[in-house]
Amino acid sequence: MDDIGGNDDGDDGDMELYDLRVVVDRIEGRSVCGMEVGDCFTLENSAHLRLPDGEHFCVYALASVLPFLAAKQRDLAEGDWLARDTLFSCPDPEERLVMRVERTRRRRMNSADLT
């Protein structure tokens, strides 16, 4: 996959990861947790989770997408279902909140800095 946003300052790291943005794509039920379409968080530099100032993100919605984020940060094999799928659902059946995971930037990083 091509770079999205370029590499991180020309660093000669030994691995590449994508920064991600998780956005509320739609709410098909009623918003129980106070979230709205467009609410989001970003995952940068491997493990830095950031929310826009003054915003919140439902912990249950976060918990439902969290197990997939490490894989979405990496290049995946062609044909891997997770490479194609970008939508994830909150477990609350009344809310039916759907989140979209987007790759925003590809970073070259040193694995020694992360372990």
Image: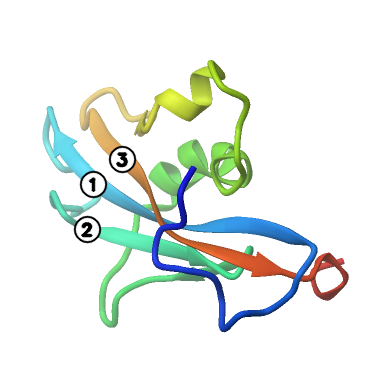
Q: In the rendered view, does 115 fall on the left or right side of 37?
A: right
Picture quadrant where residue 69 is located = top right
The secondary element bearing badge 2 is classed as: loop
**Res 24 label:** 1
Q: In the rendered view, does 99 fall on the left or right side of 11?
A: left
30 and 100: which is toward the camera: 100
The secondary element bearing badge 1 is classed as: strand
Q: Nearer the viewer, mark 3 or mark 2?
A: 3
The secondary element bearing badge 3 is classed as: strand
The residue located at (30%, 75%) in the rendering is 52
Image quadrant in which the C terminus is located: bottom right
Q: Earlier in the sequence, mark 3 or mark 2?
A: 2
Query: Disc 2 vs disc 1: Cβ atoms closer than 8 Å?
Result: yes
The residue located at (26%, 34%) in the rendering is 98
Q: Which residue is mark 3?
A: 100
Q: Nearer the viewer, mark 1 or mark 3?
A: 3
Q: Which residue is mark 2?
A: 39
Q: Earlier in the sequence, mark 2 or mark 1?
A: 1
Image: 93 above or below 57: above
Query: Disc 1 vs disc 3: Cβ atoms closer than 8 Å?
Result: no
Q: What kind of residue is marked 2?
A: Asp
Q: Position of residue 41 (x, y in %)?
A: 36, 62
The residue located at (49%, 28%) in the rendering is 83
The type of colouring in the image is rainbow
10 Å neighbourhood of mark 1: few (<14), some, or many (≥20)? Answer: many
Q: What kind of residue is marked 1?
A: Val
